[in-house]
Image (cartoon, rainbow, N blue to C red):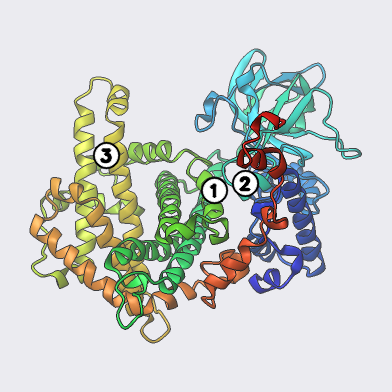
């Protein structure tokens, strides 16, 4: 699929940073429509179509249509609603978006202000925006394209509120695309970066008493009858959480893709770039400096770690779905906490890592031609969409504290929290590291991470118990609780990396390289969070020093294979979109060539020379028409 996109001139993207907003947006409409035409012509499956859009590599209205609108109807619509709306959505006879976030509320979904009031006389809901802050704000595709939206609003029947629910609302006429009566709609303006998310029409939307039929409320788990009575259906409410697990699993997979892309660019360029250390007239490759390796190789290891934890999350989603269908909700709280935490951990780490990769490319990394500024600008909103990352970590912390508080009750912790069942041992164990090589034992490494997480969780739970009101304690200790959640999530990633190494891995020497990356990932985390490991007594200062020695040794072992390890991501030059990360390494001639394409170089004299520069140089400012 990557080759199909790369070989088609219609998907060219190297001029994106030079286009104005209107031109940029229209160009994206063209590409998205052309991609849909190819999907139909080639009779691609849903999964193949998703891969094609992925390699087109441009945020577009189709992302929200397929990624949020369709799954919302599938997850929350009744059979009848699915039969009515999904065929239209699958053929793109309607284009949908997902309108949840408001100007005044994002992560706090229960605080949304838009209302949906049932009118029993007409069997309709009245959707209304009562305040400025209730304006829907941010939905991609909403600003100029979407014909429909799944809108989240406070349900009101007979003067009573019944929480936030989803409603299918038509926004624009299917004849002339004009907004329907009572609907005010537009684009929210330029976002961070040159091209980046400015290809997307993120929108603002307000409702002035807009009426929709009662059957356009998504009623799979909660229904409003003709008389206005609210009825909980026999479909368990927990099924909705299955969709959330799916969405967050895809976000973790996207983090792995974005991080591996940035690391590929930085690693290849680090091998091309030479600076200082001239011997026989040849300067040293930047990748040979330990300072470069110390910053770059842990990011390479993270890209692989996130790939493997993403694969595991796919399995988890399948497992949770099967359990939900069998009315088994026992693993749901743990799966929910796990996916929330991993979404937070991987997106934060990836956003920081892309910026670090830009700096690893020196001054040239700041050029749009490097591909890194735009990649960062496209990626960084992942830290706040689908749940702000700190808010998500607090949800994880709540779950961990609850798990610790139930340890004596006979309720065994499960899944990613199973290690807390051995909390007595983990509170007392001592790390068995005598030499640097001892850190290369999976049991030693895992025990250190388990002990750190368990001791932090127990300490936080004990501190919380000192407060008369638990909520006051939670607010006061929230920063400490976030740290415990991070420790738990890092343990999950490390353990899933080790699990991957237990599998049958084909290829001569591949397993050894993956082992090196696994230990680099874990030991680098240990180094970065040394305060946790030392203050909880998991390791000694001497053992920390030995971990550093082992880390340096691992960098030397990865160095000869670094380029092969990024080539293994198998990205085309088109997808990478970077002169610095070119597969053929022909960086400098291409950078030079790229510079001359800038519109400022269309003429030798710049526009404005006669009005501004010449009068200044000729000391004739009094004559200039400024």
Which quadrant would residue 456 be assigned to in this image? Answer: top left
Say which residue appears at 69% left-offset and 49% top-offset: 606
Mark 1, residue position: 377
Q: Give the CA distance from mark 1 to mark 2.
A: 7 Å
Mark 1 burial class by Cα count in 10 Å: few <14, some 14-19, many 20+: many
Q: Disc 1, disc 2: CB below 8 Å? A: yes
Residue 133 lies in quadrant? top right
Pick whichever of labels 3 and 1 is earlier in the sequence: 1
Q: State whether residue 236 is above or below residue 538.
A: above
Residue 626 in view: no
Residue 327 locus on image (x, y percent): 51, 47
The residue closer to the viewer here, 367 or 252, is 367
User: Foreground mark, 3 or 1?
Assistant: 1
Residue 119: % across, % down: 76, 18
Residue 568, x across and y down, in percent: 48, 75
Q: Of helix, strand and loop, which one carries label 2?
A: helix
Report the residue at 53% width, 24% height from top. Answer: 111
Q: Nearer the viewer, residue 257 or 429?
A: 257
Q: Secondary structure at mark 3?
A: loop
Tell me if residue 599 comes above or below residue 556 in the rendering: above
Please name the residue that numbered disc 3 is placed on: 406
| Disc on res. 197 | 2
């Amino acid at each position: 699929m990557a080759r199909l996109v790369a070989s088609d001139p219609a998907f060219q993207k190297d001029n994106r940073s030079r286009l104005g907003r209107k031109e940029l947006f229209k160009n994206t409409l063209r590409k998205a429509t052309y991609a849909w035409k190819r999907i139909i012509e080639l009779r691609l499956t849903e999964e193949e179509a998703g891969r094609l859009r992925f390699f087109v590599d441009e945020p577009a209205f189709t992302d929200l249509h397929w990624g949020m609108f369709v799954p919302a109807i599938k997850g929350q619509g009744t059979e009848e609603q699915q039969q009515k709306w999904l065929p239209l959505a699958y053929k793109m006879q309607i284009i949908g978006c997902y309108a949840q976030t408001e100007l005044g509320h994002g992560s706090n979904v229960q605080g949304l202000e838009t209302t949906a009031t049932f009118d029993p006389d007409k069997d309709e809901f009245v959707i209304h925006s009562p305040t400025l802050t209730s304006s829907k704000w941010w939905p991609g595709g909403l600003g100029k394209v979407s014909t429909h939206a799944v809108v989240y609003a406070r349900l009101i029947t007979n003067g009573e509120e019944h929480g936030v629910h989803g409603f299918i609302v038509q926004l624009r006429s299917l004849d002339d695309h004009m907004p329907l009566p009572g609907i005010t709609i537009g684009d929210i303006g330029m976002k961070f970066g040159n091209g980046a998310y400015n290809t997307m029409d993120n929108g603002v939307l307000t409702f002035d008493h807009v009426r929709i039929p009662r059957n356009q409320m998504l009623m799979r788990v909660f229904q409003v009858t003709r008389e206005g009575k609210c009825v909980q259906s026999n479909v368990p409410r927990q099924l909705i959480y299955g969709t959330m697990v799916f969405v967050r699993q895809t976000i973790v997979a996207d983090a792995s893709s974005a991080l591996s892309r940035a690391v590929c660019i930085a690693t290849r360029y680090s091998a091309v770039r030479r600076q200082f250390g001239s011997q026989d007239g040849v300067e040293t490759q930047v990748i040979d400096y330990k300072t470069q390796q110390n910053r770059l190789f842990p990011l390479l290891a993270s890209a692989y770690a996130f790939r493997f934890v993403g694969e595991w999350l796919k399995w988890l989603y399948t497992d949770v779905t099967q359990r939900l269908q069998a009315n088994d909700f026992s693993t749901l709280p743990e799966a929910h906490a796990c996916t929330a935490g991993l979404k937070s951990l991987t997106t934060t780490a990836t956003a920081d890592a892309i910026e670090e990769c830009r700096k690893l490319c020196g001054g040239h990394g700041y050029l749009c031609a490097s591909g890194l500024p735009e990649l960062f600008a496209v990626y960084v909103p992942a830290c706040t969409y689908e749940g702000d990352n700190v808010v998500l970590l607090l949800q994880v912390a709540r779950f961990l504290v609850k798990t610790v508080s139930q340890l004596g009750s006979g309720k065994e912790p499960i899944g990613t929290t199973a290690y807390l069942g051995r909390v007595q041992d983990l509170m007392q164990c001592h790390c068995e590291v005598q030499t640097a090589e001892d850190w290369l034992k999976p049991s030693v490494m895992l025990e250190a991470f388990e002990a750190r997480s368990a001791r932090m969780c127990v300490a936080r739970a004990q501190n919380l118990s000192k407060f008369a009101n638990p909520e006051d304690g939670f607010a006061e200790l929230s920063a400490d609780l976030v740290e415990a959640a991070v420790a738990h999530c890092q343990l999950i990633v490390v353990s899933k990396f080790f699990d991957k190494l237990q599998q049958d891995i084909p290829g001569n020497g591949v397993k050894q390289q993956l082992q090196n990356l696994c230990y680099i990932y874990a030991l680098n985390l240990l180094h970065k969070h040394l305060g946790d490991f030392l203050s909880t007594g998991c390791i000694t200062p001497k053992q920390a020093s030995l971990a550093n020695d082992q880390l340096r040794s691992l960098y030397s072992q990865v160095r000869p294979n670094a380029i092969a390890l990024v080539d293994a991501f198998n990205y085309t030059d088109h997808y990478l979109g970077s002169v610095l990360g070119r597969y053929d390494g022909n960086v400098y001639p291409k950078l030079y060539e790229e510079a001359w394409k800038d519109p400022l170089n269309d003429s030798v004299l710049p526009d404005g020379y006669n009005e501004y520069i010449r009068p200044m140089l000729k000391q004739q400012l009094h004559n200039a028409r400024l």
